[in-house]
Amino acid sequence: MPSQTDDAHRPTRQRSNTGAFPFNWRRRAENAAAPAPPTISAPLQWDALIEALTPPAVPSLNYARSLATALGALDSHTPPPRLASLQPVLASLCSSSSPTSLQAAGYDILTAYLEGSGSSLLTTSDRLSCLSLFFDVPWSHELWEARSKALAALVGSGSNSVGMEGQVLRMLSSWIERAFEGLTRSDSISHEDRLERQCSVESLTTFLINLVRRPEFVSRLTEADTAGVLQLWERMVDKSLSVPGDYPNLVSPPASPYFEPQSSKAASPPKLSSSHRRHHSSTSIPKLSLLKHPADIIVDAYLIYLSERLVALAPSYLTSILPLLFRALAFYSTPLPRISLEPNISHHHTLEQKITDVLSKLVSGPYASSCRILLKRHFFPSSQTTLQVSVQASVGALRTFRLSLRRVLESRLARAYIERASIVDYSPAGVPSHLAVEQGLMQRAWAPDESASWDLTRFANVLARAAKAWIAQGQEATPNVIAAPKEAVLYEIASIVKDVIQAMDKGGDDEDVDDEEVAAIGRILRELVVYIRSVKMPDGSLIPVSLHRPDGSSPFLVAMATILAEDLRTSPLFLVLPSIILSIADHLPDRDLTQLLTTMSERQCLSPTSLSWLDEWRNLLTMSNLFWPTRAGTRQHVMDHLQSVWEFVKDIPAYRKPLASLVFDIWKRHPAEELEDNSTLVVWNLLADEAVLRLVERHLENSSTDPCGEEEGLCEEILEYLSSMAHERLDEEDDTASIRTVESQMPSPPGLIPPANTASTSPILSRMTSDYPGVREKETSLPSVMSILTSLTSGAPSRSQSKPRRPTNDMHIQIEASPVIAPTEPPPLTPKSVGAVIGLVSAFSQLVFTPLALSQCSLWHAKRIFKHLVGLISDAGCVRARLTVLQFMMRLRVDRDHRLYFASAEYDKDGNIAHLAALINRAEAGPSTVEDLLRDDEIRRARARAPPQQERDGRKASRGRGGARMDTSRSRSRVPARVLPTAMLRPKPRDPLWSIPEVLSLSVAASDVSSEGMTSYDPTNPGHNETVLPLSLYLSKLVEVIETERDWEILSYVLCHLPTQLANKHLFCGPRSKIVIGRLLATLCSGITDGTLATKIERWPDGIISRDAQGLAFHTLTVLVSYKRCFENTQQLHHLVEVFLMGLNGQPSTQKCCLHALSLAAFELQPSMAKHLSRIMEKLSQIMSNPAMAVHIIDFLAIVGSQRSLYVNFTEGDYKMVFAVALKYLEHHNRADGSLSISWALSQHVRIMSYYIVYVWFLAVDLEDRHRHVSYIVRQLLLANSGRAEVDAPTEVAFDWLARYTYASADPRPAKSTLDEIVMNPNLQAKSSEPAVSEKTWILGNSVVTIRALARRGWIEVLSRRASGTTKFLVRAENVPMIPLGDVDPDLVSISATLMMDREDNGEELTTGEDATDRFIGNPSLGDVKEALSDNAQSLSSVPRPDPITGYVWSGSAPSQRRKEVLMDPSYFALQLSAYPDKRPAGRGRLVKDKSRLASFIRTFDRMPVIDTHKVGVMYVAPGQQQEAEILRNTHGSPAYTRFLEGLGRLINLRGQVDVYDGGLDPDVDGEYAYAWWDDIGQILFHTATLMPNGEDPNCTSKKAHIGNDYVRIVWNDSGMPYKFDTLSTQFQFVNIVIEPHSRGAIAAFSNNLHEHEYFKVTVQRADGMVEFTPIGDFKLISAVNLPQLVRQLSLLSDWFVTVWQNTGGDKRRDEVITNWRSRLEAIRRFRDQILATDEEPEPEPDDSLTGQQRLRDFSVAY
């Protein structure tokens, strides 16, 4: 016998092939080469082979295969061997101890024997003995096919299995399970092994199914056999459905989003897993494509088995069959399309459709009732199975119900469609016609009626209970998390509801809605949303749900969002959805809730028209997260709707009171830790409204104020609540939130990528959503991928997972999780104390600024609230509440009648508050208002970048500079020991709480409307009065704040707003206010002097120090100048001026403020100014190095120079300091390096005004002392011109001017006199016996001297024309006797002229007719002289007396030439005839011989003004006027305006006016009178509109022709409204000096009560781009007595600057302004150059020869 080892060299036998069994595939070893068969002498016969294989012979593999081949080759005529002879061989070969190859050969022998003729010889016992060969054999890769074929051959497809059916089934079950076990294992096995097992399972299950197809086989089965087979299927299906998703080398595309173990749904082969690594035995990819998911094999086989056996199985087996089908359906379930009558493209998996068909037959077949019971049972979780099994069973059961329900819904839709189509057209017989409906649609419409069984109303309760049970399942152990397995069940329930809703939507508006069905949907949804409330994100936060854009975090959430996103305006679910949506409000974004609120409001759910409106409001106001920062939009909408409803019910007490009580009750229980924003102010205002309305209703019958303090009720309860909440303390960090609107954007969380298409945010998304996965992936594929990538790279999830927390200053605001999150601004938070303050303010304003103020009870309660508000300034619970009180208080004003009002539009009309806020970085400075702060701004910016311990000037902070600072808590304080880091000493700065412009949250009943009952003072009853508000308490509280405040926000707000409020002088009247104002002055002065002001501040902002606060205090002190009557002690006024003097040591902004204040004090506080003026001048000489201060210093010197009483005690050194300041600016201007950092126009203005200061102050020096200053002035002027070849023209003018006024105070232009007219009149002289007047002219340096003389009478007229003026001398040579030789009569003409020389001609020229001259022609008689003298006396006595109101009416020549004392030094005469200031040595002059050129020069030169002239318009604006025409038509003004004009100038008669500048006025057109002012330097003509006649022109064109062309206009504004800059339309719109009352109101404008017009407010309006150049600043208060002088100085300064501005093209060209004096100088120079150019006589050269000496001594040539 050959050994077993020879088998390896034996040829491989061919497998037998049987067509009765499906084992027709055998895989060969692909790389194994067939060995060459050994050489055999001759083949053995089957009997020899049997003998060779019979034990105890050692079996040979070749022999065994040869035997199988031989047996298979026997034909029907050849008798087969007996089984008994084969049994030993089979037993030996098929033994489990034999090698595998021998076992396979043994089974092949048995197969060949049974498939041949041997089967006919077998008995049952033989078959049973053969069957024993198959027992207890494990599954083998090499044996399963041979063994299976042998068994098939044995049983003969069931025909030969009599008596062994059970054994065969149990054997097959064992084989199938053993083969299937390898497919469900997760360990690593080869792909070949998996393929073998897959084929084995498929073959064996097919064999099993083929067996049960045979009725004869099935008929012999017992119940135990059937049960065993079903249990086999149950076990295998359970295992297959539990195979994990990472089944090796298989990728099952997910059909259901909830189950990982899924099979391939596509017909194409499955793809390789990304984690697959090829096995070493794998040789080709196609092998892998043959692999199937275990469930695909088993479920398919199971369905085939059921199709064969289901009808024969007993109903009791449904308990095991249905769960498996449910689980399988869940495993293969795919999204269902929308319910529609249109045919849908099938997206179902083949197995899903098979499962559906089987279940459909079951639930609608004979066992429908049992199936429904089991169906409902499996809706609920099972405690007997695992969670996965229970979920699968429930999902499958729900899907089964859903499919049945969808058929019912589609049937309903089909019937509805047919009904709608049938009514379109009817035949004449009344039957519908043209009804073309598909047959399938008709069948669906009238399918077997299942509506009664599958109606939602029947299943609603069980579905709701099932949802509740699933939500509670396992929740005690672990809380619900997103995408939990149980969500698959809830998703199916939600999908059932969604299908019903879609059917409703499809049915149209005509179909009646079943209320029971709507209620059923509501019951189910109420249970489902419980899960949303319980589910948590992985980090424990709430899960966000977006209705307008459902995210893909969970299909259940998407489905629920789709359902809840129904359009409530049209949806029949409106009755149930709002309450359901509100129950999950915590999870919804603002957009969804706001849309819901809008719809509820539109459908009147929140108004009294709804019976449940109060319940709805309770639900809204008690929403748990309504006051979270993420609920800004919802909160805003809730409050807006509450405001709207409140306005509706406000006048209906029956509705108003319940709503107010509800809101008050909820608000009292509002959590204290939750902050609010501005939207909740509606509630606070509502409470205030209710308190006021309850108060009014209570006092309708009894208006007495006696019981007011004793009454109790809801009104008092609300007010007490508001007061207590206003005192509620707030955490410091929460208190740092800003009350202004912050322009900031919050970045989106990482991983949230906004999609390109935003059209999917429709509120009716449910009508456009498809369940198809392909559609959803197409729409959102890019955002999803990008979201995943972003989350991977950033480490953050694609959705927000942060839990909303109570907001504080250092916490980020929670942003709703949504696929698109736009940048949002954090809502401005409003603490409760702020809201309470706003409520108190609202109540006060309603009691005061409405007609309720007519009630004494209202005023009583208003004063009570006012006292509470005053107390809250220091006692409120947080800084923001205190600031809110100040925001209201600082806007309180009174009109001229002391009636209180809240200023809104005119709150800061002068811009003073904004200007002060800009100084401390709380507002942006306006354009062209801070050029003089250029250096200050640069220093401020540098200081902001510097460390906090450094000051502006670069020096480290110390306790010097203004006094010791004892506050040791500040970082600037010095520490005696070691120096600690700044961060350790300096507290963290507070975020700014206010800035300009402000957006107030206050609710004031009527802004800018005067109260009808509340006043600040009652002049008729200064004592106790119920109508007078105790404003002294408020002012006293402000003083307390200034003294003790520790918070910069409060102190800065007071210091910035107090000056504007104090400017309303009628606000603080009465003896109590007078005392407090004195305290205020003392507090500010002492705080600045001692350096203690603002030293208690604990937290300073970066870049701000106490010196800034002190700088703001100077603005308040400036306004206090107008309260000088409140300071009885003159020492207080002296101290005030001294404080202003100290302020000149401060920063530039403080210096400017103090200079303006000192300019005002020059008029108002003259005794104190005179006392400190020398020190002020000394300080000015020290601070003048800053060019930005130049214009303000110059303005101050000009104003002081106009007030002689201030410098009456000046010494020579004091005057020299003034000259030094002015002349130093000339030196700065003339610098060649251009270091002057101010604009060119301002620099030109400063230069002109510097010369003006020199002239003004030089004239202020006594005549006998003027020459002492000439040397210093000349030296400084020359220093200013250093580096130049010649001095400039203005300096030449200055030299000439000094020569004129050093030794005399004579006018710059000679006046006409009677003496001159009589003596030097050529006409008179020509008629006498005397020869005519002779005249010669010489050029002496920069002067032209003309001398005229009478040849015989001895009279000589000397006329010196210079740049600074013209001087005329009329002298008589005493060498000429009065009675010459030969004359009998004396010179009576000279005598009479001498006697009449002091007579004033009043501007009338001397008559030169025959009647007048005849008296003096020839030799007049003594009688003629007497008659002339008599006429002179009469004319002197006829001068009219001054008018008692308007004073003198000046006419003729300038009165200054006759109304002042003129002193003259002899040097004056010599200087006027000298060549000074010509730098060449004094010569003989140049005689002018060209008479024609001389006459032309004199005509032109004499028309040039000898002083500077100005014209200024004056307009009066009557009460209520705003238009140009009505203002110009005014012909008179108020008494105060008239008194102002009297002080502004002198009333002159324009007719015959010779010396006073008339400003182009024509007496015949513009009136005979005008106001003018003049001095030795300049003249101003005021174009006064009220003095000019209107004529017939309604537009007053003639008035506008003059006033409209003036650069500067003075506007007296009694209109009661702000005067607009462009009221007068003209291109010359430069400067308006506006005078108006400091308190609003036009009623008292024409009152002559001096107390009402004691002070006025002056403001200066400038054109755009024009820098500040006046000492007014934002505004100034000036007394009526000093008002004209101030305005006159302002008009002079303004006209000078505007002239420069206009000449330089708005500061765009570097052109110089030519003054009148300079024009005269240049005219003289041009004339001199012309004469010298045409003169033939050359300039004599020094020559000592005789000829030279003769030429020099020969004076006849030059004279």
Image (cartoon, grey):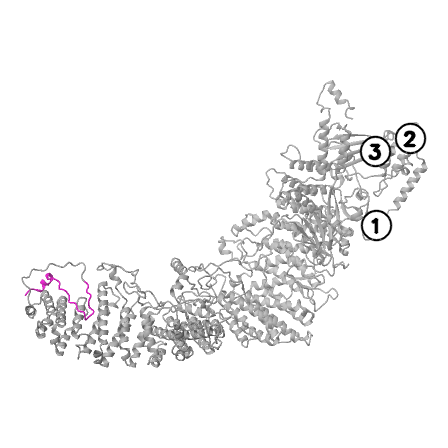
The answer to whether residue 13 is magenta is yes
Residue at horizontal 69 percent and vertical 71 percent from the top = 856
Question: Which of 1581 and 643 lies nearest the eye of the viewer?
Answer: 643
The N terminus lies in quadrant:
bottom left
Are the two marked residues, 2 and 1, in contact with CB atoms closer than 8 angstroms? no
Amino acid at the residue labelled 1: Pro
Q: Residue beneath label 2, please?
A: 1379
- 10 Å crowding of disc 3: few (<14), some (14-19), many (20+): few
Label whose residue precedes the other's in the sequence (2 or 3)? 3
Seen from this angle, which residue lies furthest top? 1746
Magenta residues (range): 1-27
Q: Is residue 710 above or below residue 1586?
A: below
Q: Is residue 829 visible?
A: yes
The C terminus lies in quadrant:
top right
Q: Position of residue 593 (x, y in %)?
A: 50, 68
Residue 1445 appears left or right of 1031? right
Q: Position of residue 1102 (x, y in %)?
A: 53, 54
Q: Secondary structure at mark 3?
A: strand
Q: Is residue 389 visible?
A: no
The answer to whether residue 1426 is magenta is no
Q: Position of residue 114 (x, y in %)?
A: 13, 72
Residue 901 appears left or right of 165? right
Q: Position of residue 806 (x, y in %)?
A: 48, 66
Q: Compute the Cα span from label 3 to label 1.
A: 35 Å
Q: Compute the Cα span from label 2 to label 1.
A: 44 Å
Label whose residue precedes the other's in the sequence (3 or 1)? 3
Any mark on residue 1371, and which?
3
Q: Residue beneath label 1, please?
A: 1442
- 10 Å crowding of disc 2: few (<14), some (14-19), many (20+): few
Q: Compute the Cα span from label 2 to label 3.
A: 17 Å
Amino acid at the residue labelled 2: Ile
Q: Is residue 1476 above or below residue 798?
A: above
